[in-house]
Image (spheres, helix red, strand yellow):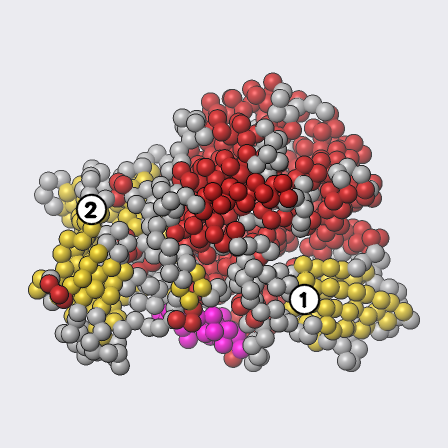
């Protein structure tokens, strides 16, 4: 049963510590085919200074209570008040000096747990997910992140069903029991909150390696997969070892247990989970081989493996005091995984990719009804706050601190944070204070970034006379749906002044200018100016290099300057930004003006795009990024209101067609000089060449006006990256061709037994950019391989359609909205958390023209009126309507 209570609002200002501390937990799990019995013995003590009469109130969620005892004596009667969602017990014997042992037994039905929170089964494997509030679905507990305990866990199961028995920490004991059953005992010496608890039991294949930490600890690394899949875990293992080396080198952080285990499962609500010493992963972020995974998948595995590993320090050793502080671990850990990828691959390419993610996920969230600050101050359902704002914007805030402090002082702040807060459940204030102290600076104004929702606008005007360049900056923050303050922020603006030969000019700001530190201007006031004198010529002004702050930049800059920067900014990110912004504006204006006319098809734009792809000084991956036009959702966001998705689609198609028409010869030449690669290697340089080659396939196929080229590429492909790129051109650009039909069919036949590849197949078909894709998607929902209860599959079809198909989801007759709403209604009782995440696809509904808005509102209102809606889904639907 999904929780269907309205849910009280939880408020940051109501935080108060618990009356009781749980110091140690001993658990025993007896796993059987149809049920699991759990005994939890908690060693508790009353916190000093609390009311000696206050009862202990433990959280539960849909629990089946069996019995309870204190210090070995059964309790019942008026001492105990128990329901599926709460256990209340009077504990006069517990004092600050005197600990007691509370033992609670519960009975679980993992087979029936389709929510995938708590203890559940996936393809026969027992597995847990406890963040954020899943532990209370296993046992009654103080299920909150500021209650830290050591755990000792005994797991018992049938040896054949579950030869592998895992939990957090180090293995201490294992052995046989009667009846072909066996047991294992795990001990985790690091005090941790309950959300980091994990247990896995099943018939799993391991791959194993050893790692020696810098200080000499020998660690056994194991990745477990379902039977027969372990040959696909090698790259994940490699990424894990590289992550461990990187964290030692870059932040001086070492691993702290004797074993590090990862388990990959097929049913998982999110990407992965950082449980202490026992990370649980979605198949998608572990299993890879060239034949079934794309370069994007390789990159995703590397990122998520690193992210979860880095949580061991930022999240586990130092955790969050309460869930309002979620960005303390998530924003910081995303920052760390971004830095890892930048160091391992290409910094510019990674930064462009991160900014792309930020703009396509976080900006729309921050500009619509689901807006919230990076540190929210209230929630109804915490699961709905694992958002792009907390993760991606949270990472941007850490990045800004690093920009403001500079590398050395930033590192000193991090060192202080680890030294001071190891073992703590900390807050954002604790984190900021470390940088203030280590960096000898005041970050109180900067801290507003954590409390003020919305994307600030940064305006820049430039003027030049008599060798003096004046830059006038102003900032503003529009009030949004979150209703948070809009006071001036600290905005670090990285910049460069570029001469006509593409070199950075050294220039010193005049006295009286806003604060400038090296190549960073620090804007703290609503408006401020910087003046550079004695310049031999008017330079090109490259601002917001590296996207040094998550703002909307309005830079009144001559088009010729922008085109020049796109060509010769020595900062590769600056080149990308100049070009993307220009193209985005043209597409925006073209769509507003009615489709194909206006400046969108200005030959200068196409020329700039083609020239950047030709530029051999840039690495291929970057050239592929330069060539990528903003997507339809991004263009819609730039338009902001009264959007007609048909016009958006038309203008984008027109620009693509123009590039194909005017650039095909030059682009063919680029392709020819790139050549091919002998065999597949997942390294960044090879992936970059594939990315560029595959990016060229679309314009070249459009120029041919035929699917032949893509069909050939499909047939010749020896890896999934090339195969899927070719199939996408076939299915999306030439959907009615026989060649497309054949390829889609042969792809299915070849990979129908591979779940991860079938997700790609469903996604590909859900995103065919035509309004009548809806009918196709309706049929796919009846396909024998479609399973609503598998989050990856539901996301591929429903999520793919709702977020990746602007034309069909936003159909003028509202049928797209109604279909998605209907799927959410069906999914909600099965898996409310996934239903709620998918529902966020409606977040930009108010940006559309009135007819579509009316349909979207009706679909949402219908959904809101559904009896028994879960708290998760109701929260998103209600907020979306506000
Ligand atoms: N902490 C994880 C994300 C995560 C959150 C909730 C989950 O519950 C289903 C699972 C995972 C991370 O940042 O990777
Ligand atoms: Zn995380």
Disc ID at residue 36:
2
Q: In this view, does 411 lie to the left or right of 666?
A: left
- Residue ID for mark 1: 476
**Magenta part mainly helix, strand or loop?**
helix
Quarter where residue 770 is shown: top right
Q: Is residue 600 left or right of residue 385?
A: right
* Number of numbered discs overlaid on the protein picture: 2
Q: Which type of secondary structure does the marked residue at label 2 adopt? A: strand
Disc ID at residue 20:
none
Question: Which mark sits nearer the N-terminus, 2 or 1?
Answer: 2
- Mark 1 crowdedness (10 Å alpha carbons): few <14, some 14-19, many ≥20: some
Can residue 824 be found in the magenta stretch?
no
Quarter where residue 267 is shown: top left
Can residue 424 be found in the magenta stretch?
yes
Residue lying farthest to the top in this orientation: 738
Does residue 47 sit above or below 116 in this rendering? below
- Which of discs 2 and 1 lies nearer the camera? The answer is 1
Is residue 452 among the parts visible in the rendering? yes
Q: Which type of secondary structure does the marked residue at label 1 adopt? A: strand
Residue 579: % across, % down: 74, 50
Does residue 578 sit above or below 856 in this rendering? below
Residue occupying image coordinates x 70% and y 76%:
515
Q: Does any atom of ligand 1 lie closer than 8 Å to the CB of label 2? A: no
Q: In this view, does 148 lie to the left or right of 745?
A: left
Residue 302: % across, % down: 49, 48
Q: What stretch is highlighted in magenta?
A: 412-436
Q: Nearer the viewer, residue 230 or 809?
A: 809
Disc 2/disc 1 C-alpha distance (Å)? 56 Å
Q: Nearer the viewer, residue 675 or 120?
A: 120
Residue lying farthest to the right in this orientation: 466
Residue occupying image coordinates x 25% and y 68%:
22
């Amino acid at each position: 049963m999904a929780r269907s209570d309205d849910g009280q609002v939880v408020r940051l200002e109501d935080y108060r510590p618990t009356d009781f501390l749980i110091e140690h937990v001993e658990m025993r799990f007896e796993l059987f085919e149809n049920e699991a019995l759990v005994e939890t013995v908690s060693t508790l003590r009353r916190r000093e200074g609390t009311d000696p009469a206050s009862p202990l109130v433990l959280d539960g969620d849909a629990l089946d209570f069996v019995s309870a005892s204190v210090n070995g004596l059964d309790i019942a009667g008026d001492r105990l008040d128990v329901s599926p969602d709460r256990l209340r017990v009077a504990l006069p014997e517990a004092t600050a000096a005197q600990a007691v042992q509370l033992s609670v037994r519960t009975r679980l039905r993992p087979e029936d747990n389709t929510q995938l929170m708590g203890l559940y089964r996936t393809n026969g494997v027992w597995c847990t997910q406890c963040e954020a509030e899943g532990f209370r679905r296993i046992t009654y507990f103080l299920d909150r992140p500021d209650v830290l305990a050591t755990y000792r866990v005994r797991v018992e199961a049938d040896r054949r069903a579950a030869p592998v028995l895992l939990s957090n920490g180090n293995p201490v004991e294992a052995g046989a029991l009667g009846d072909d059953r066996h047991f294992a005992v795990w001990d985790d010496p690091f005090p941790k909150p309950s959300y980091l608890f994990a247990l896995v039991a099943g018939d799993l294949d391991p791959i194993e390696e050893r790692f020696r930490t810098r200080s000499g600890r020998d660690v056994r690394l194991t990745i477990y997969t379902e039977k027969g899949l372990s040959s696909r875990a090698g790259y994940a293992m490699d990424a894990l070892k590289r992550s461990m080396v990187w964290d030692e080198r870059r932040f001086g952080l070492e691993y702290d247990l004797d074993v590090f285990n990862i388990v990959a499962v097929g049913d998982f609500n999110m990407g992965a989970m950082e449980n202490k010493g026992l990370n649980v992963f979605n198949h998608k972020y572990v299993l890879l081989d060239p034949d079934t995974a794309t370069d994007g998948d390789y990159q995703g595995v590397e990122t998520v493996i690193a992210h979860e590993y880095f949580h061991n320090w930022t999240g586990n050793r130092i955790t969050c005091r309460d869930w309002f502080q979620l960005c303390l671990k998530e924003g910081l850990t995303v920052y760390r995984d971004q830095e890892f990828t930048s160091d391992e691959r290409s910094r510019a390419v990674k930064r462009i990719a991160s900014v792309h993610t930020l703009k396509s996920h976080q900006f729309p969230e921050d500009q619509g009804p689901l807006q919230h600050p990076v540190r929210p101050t209230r929630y109804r359902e915490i699961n709905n706050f694992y958002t792009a704002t907390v993760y991606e914007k949270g990472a941007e805030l850490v990045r800004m601190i690093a920009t403001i402090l500079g590398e050395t002082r930033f590192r000193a702040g991090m060192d202080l944070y680890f030294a001071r807060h190891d073992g703590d459940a900390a807050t954002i204030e604790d984190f900021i204070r470390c940088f203030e102290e280590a960096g000898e600076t005041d970050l109180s104004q900067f801290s507003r970034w954590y409390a003020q929702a919305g994307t600030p606008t940064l305006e820049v005007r430039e003027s030049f006379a008599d060798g003096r360049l004046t830059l006038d900056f102003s900032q503003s923050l529009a009030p949004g749906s979150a209703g948070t303050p809009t006071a001036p922020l600290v905005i670090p603006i990285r910049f460069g002044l570029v001469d006509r030969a593409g070199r950075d000019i050294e220039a010193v700001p005049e006295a009286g200018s806003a604060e400038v530190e090296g190549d960073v201007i620090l804007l703290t006031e609503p408006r401020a100016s910087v003046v550079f004198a004695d310049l031999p010529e008017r330079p090109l002004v490259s601002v917001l290099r590296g996207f040094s702050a998550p703002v909307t930049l309005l830079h009144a800059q001559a088009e010729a300057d922008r085109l020049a920067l796109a060509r010769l900014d020595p900062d590769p990110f600056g080149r990308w930004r100049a070009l993307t912004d220009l193209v985005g504006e043209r597409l925006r204006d073209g769509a507003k003006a009615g489709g194909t006319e206006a400046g969108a098809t200005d030959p200068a734009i196409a020329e700039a795009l083609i020239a950047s792809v030709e530029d051999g000084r840039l690495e291929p991956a970057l050239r592929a990024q330069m060539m990528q036009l903003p997507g339809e959702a991004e263009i819609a966001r730039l338009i902001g209101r009264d959007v007609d998705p048909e016009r958006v689609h038309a203008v984008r198609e027109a620009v693509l067609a123009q590039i194909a028409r005017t650039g095909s010869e030059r682009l063919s030449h680029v392709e020819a000089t790139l050549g091919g690669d002998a065999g597949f290697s997942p390294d960044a340089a090879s992936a970059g060449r594939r990315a560029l080659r595959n990016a060229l396939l679309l314009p070249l196929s459009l120029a041919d006006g035929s699917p032949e080229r893509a069909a050939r590429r499909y047939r010749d492909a020896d890896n999934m990256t090339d195969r899927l790129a070719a199939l996408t051109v076939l299915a999306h650009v030439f959907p009615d061709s026989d060649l497309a039909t054949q390829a889609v069919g042969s792809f299915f036949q070849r990979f129908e037994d591979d779940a991860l590849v079938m997700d790609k197949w469903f996604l590909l078909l859900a995103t065919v950019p035509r309004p009548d894709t809806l009918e196709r998607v309706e049929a796919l929902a009846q396909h024998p391989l479609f399973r609503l209860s598998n989050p990856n599959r539901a996301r591929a079809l429903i999520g793919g359609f709702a977020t990746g198909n602007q034309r069909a989801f936003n159909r003028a007759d509202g049928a797209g909205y109604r279909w998605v709403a209907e799927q959410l209604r069906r999914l909600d009782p099965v898996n409310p958390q996934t239903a709620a995440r998918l529902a966020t696809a409606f977040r930009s509904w108010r940006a559309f023209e009135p007819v579509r808005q009316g349909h979207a509102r009706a679909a949402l209102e219908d959904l809101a009126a559904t009896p028994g809606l879960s708290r998760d889904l109701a929260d998103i639907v209600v907020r979306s309507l506000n």
